[in-house]
Image (tube, helix red, strand yellow):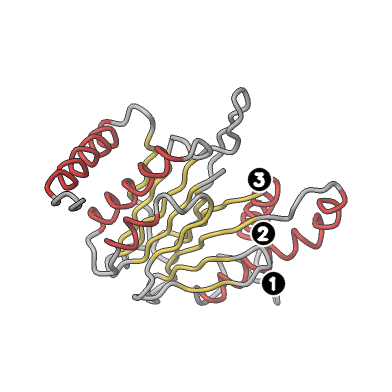
Amino acid sequence: MTYCVGLLLDEGLVMAADTRTNAGVDNVGKFKKLHTWSKPGERIFVLLTAGNLAVTQAVVSMLTEGTQEKPKKGRDSLFTVKTMFQAARLVGQAIRDVKRIDGESLSAGSDAFAASFIFAGQIGKEKPRLFQIYSAGNFIEATPDTPFFQIGEHKYGKPILDRVARNEMKLGDAAKMVLLSFDSTLRSNLSVGLPIDMLTYETGSLRFEHAKRIGIDDPYFKMLSSEWSKALRTAFANIEPFDI
């Protein structure tokens, strides 16, 4: 009951997540699924989460506690690793640690250890990098051929990303595309809901300056949804009918 998108561009990153966790008629919950850590001027990290909420919150808490502890020899944290690859490995290890602690109890209670993550950031002069991390703690990295990752209810929002996403896009255009992807998902799946947390990051800035929560009354999102519907209807009308 989640939709998250991470997009890697030459100009930076676009990261977005909805906030719905339940979609029953009388049981709707909202929790933040976009999490950040930063040392301005040195490093920034963004994590999007989907799956079992207890699992994902435990992973986030474990990573946060690591940044708050005094550095110890042989124990890295997000604030001590030297590369984004090492940071992704650290997230994977946190997932495995949570599974080691809670996995058996979850299985005994017929609950699945189900969680997936999109992780991105930049350390120093290293270029921004984007990873999709699985419940086993292993991961893959985005490339120019595939500059985006999705987790959760991804199928409705994927077509526009497949058609439009390019790593040379401008950040503003990419953010617009990501919101259209969410609009398509919201229209077709009740398990994904507003508000949407969205963050854009400019390569090399090493600080978070552009984050927004988009709610049901957001004027830009309402305009975007309306204009996209009109554009689709116009495009459909302009295509020759099938010759029966």
Q: Is residue 98 left or right of residue 46?
A: right
Kind of residue indicated by mark 3: Leu
Q: Which residue is more in the foreground, 32 or 151?
A: 151
| Foreground tag (3 vs 1) | 3
Identity, as a three-letter code, of the amino acid under mark 1: Arg
Labels 3 and 1: the sequence-earlier one: 3
Q: Which residue is mark 2?
A: 69
| Relative image position of residue 4 (x, y in whole percent) | 47, 51
Q: Nearer the viewer, mark 3 or mark 2?
A: 3
Q: What residue would you read off at disc 3?
A: 53
Quadrant of the rendered image containing residue 70: bottom right
Q: Is residue 209 above or below residue 183?
A: below
The x and y percentages for residue 132 are 52, 66
Q: Is residue 77 left or right of residue 198?
A: right
Distance from disc 3 to disc 1, alpha carbons, whole Å, reads 26 Å
* Camera-nearest label, 1 or 2: 1
Q: What mark, if any, has residue 75 been given in the picture?
A: 1
Q: Specify few, some or many for label 3: CA neighbours under 10 Å numbering under 14, 14-19, or 20 or more.
A: some
Q: CA distance from mark 3 to mark 2?
A: 24 Å
User: In the drawing, what numbered circle is on residue 215?
Assistant: none
Pick whichever, 161 or 10, lies toward us.
161
User: CB atoms at circles 3 and 2 under 8 Å apart?
Assistant: no
Q: Quadrant of the N terminus?
A: top right
Q: Earlier in the sequence, mark 3 or mark 2?
A: 3
Q: Amino acid at mark 2?
A: Glu
- Element carrying mark 2: loop
Instruction: Name the residue: 45% across, 53% down.
Output: 155
